[in-house]
Image (spheres, helix red, strand yellow):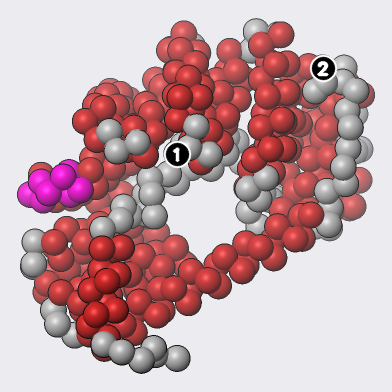
Amino acid sequence: MRFTVVFIFLCLGIRAQSSDSLIHEIMQVASDTERVNLLYKTGFDLRNTDPAHAYRLARACEHEALLSNSKKHLAKSYNLLGILFYKRSDYTKALQYHRRALQLREEIQDKLGIAISETNLGNIYTDLLYFRLAENSYLDALKQYKELDNTLQTAKCLINLGVLKHEQKQNIPAIHNFKEALKLGNSIGDYEILAICNSNIGELMAEQGLLDTALLYTEEGLKMRNMLDNEVEVADSYLNMAHIFTLQKRYSEAENYLGLAEKIAHDYDYTQARLILYKLKAELYHDTKNPDKAYLYLQKHYSLKDSLQNLEKETMVLLDEETPETTYETGHAKPAGNTWLLISCIACLFLVPFILFRYKR
């Protein structure tokens, strides 16, 4: 698993409701722009749990925005549609909508909106490995945030640039960006930024073999997450600690942190943590000469990974059923053979980055 880029957005908690009744309720709001805002926020809040529902809300949001003749609100509707298509990995449509949103925001000189659109475009370009385009987008977003004197979003943008450099295996500039973000996080006392940066720097130090330094940064990230009382993300730090201890051949300590992470993953049904947990357990048992357990956990890892991929496909099909083509005039069994050989061949796959703090926009 690789580093995760930062998305910034607003969320609104809503109760479970059918799409039709929810949209009907929102339509009773008198102000057309406020209807757009409510449709947008509720659609965004449902983007992970019910993408088909979120899509219907996004289309209603677009319709109301067109009626409002407000470029600012039309840009918001396009932004939500871009988010939903990005989440289903339809990058072509995601790019189209985010570019439409950016164009409208540039026309009205909405600096914050421009920064949001450039951030989203940078995330897509990063996933597509269009690194130059991604960097240009992130730098444009960074410029807007600095002009707005928005320290928090400036720090998050620096994190994105650090992730981008890491993707290109440019660890020195990646660490530089994370350390700059770390300074900003310290200046405003933002524990989330501090947790992200310390964890990312720890991971990069581990990749470079600087295990003692990596451990210091990872422990600091863990401390920040404990201060946030966010037990789910504490599991991520426990996994990072376990990996470093395994590399240091401190196996009993590695096993202890894997146990702590496993308990949280079980208590909170944290699937992504289990995915990494199984892989790290396979690595640990491989190094401690227990091939049967190593193979068992490797099987668990790939079985869970396949299940997640199938679930994602099902979600995409569900969304497909709700996505008519639209044209807008407005612009926008254990294998035979030597188990040890198998494990040795795939051991190299274990040196991977870990779960990090995740924003999604």
334 displayed left or right of 286: right
Query: In the image, what residue type sits under mark 1?
Result: Val
Prevailing SS of the magenta stretch: helix
258 displayed left or right of 145: left
Q: Mark 1 points at which residue?
A: 5
Which of 95/30 is in front?
95
Q: Residues within 10 Å of mark 2 (few under 14, many from 20)?
A: some
Q: Residue 158 carries which label?
A: none
Which of 253/293 is in front?
293
**Alpha carbon distance from label 2 to label 1:** 30 Å
What SS does tag 1 mark? loop
Residue 274 appears at what percent x and percent y? 40, 69
Residue drawn at point x = 71 percent, y = 53 percent: 51
Q: In which quarter of the image is the C terminus?
A: top right
Q: In this view, does 222 lie above or below 254?
A: above
Q: Which mark is residue 70?
A: 2
Residue 210 appears at what percent x and percent y? 10, 46
Residue 241 appears at what percent x and percent y? 20, 59
Q: Is residue 350 above or below residue 251?
A: above
Residue drawn at point x = 76 percent, y = 31 percent: 77
> Magenta span has 104?
no
What SS does tag 2 mark? loop
Magenta stretch bounds? 205-212
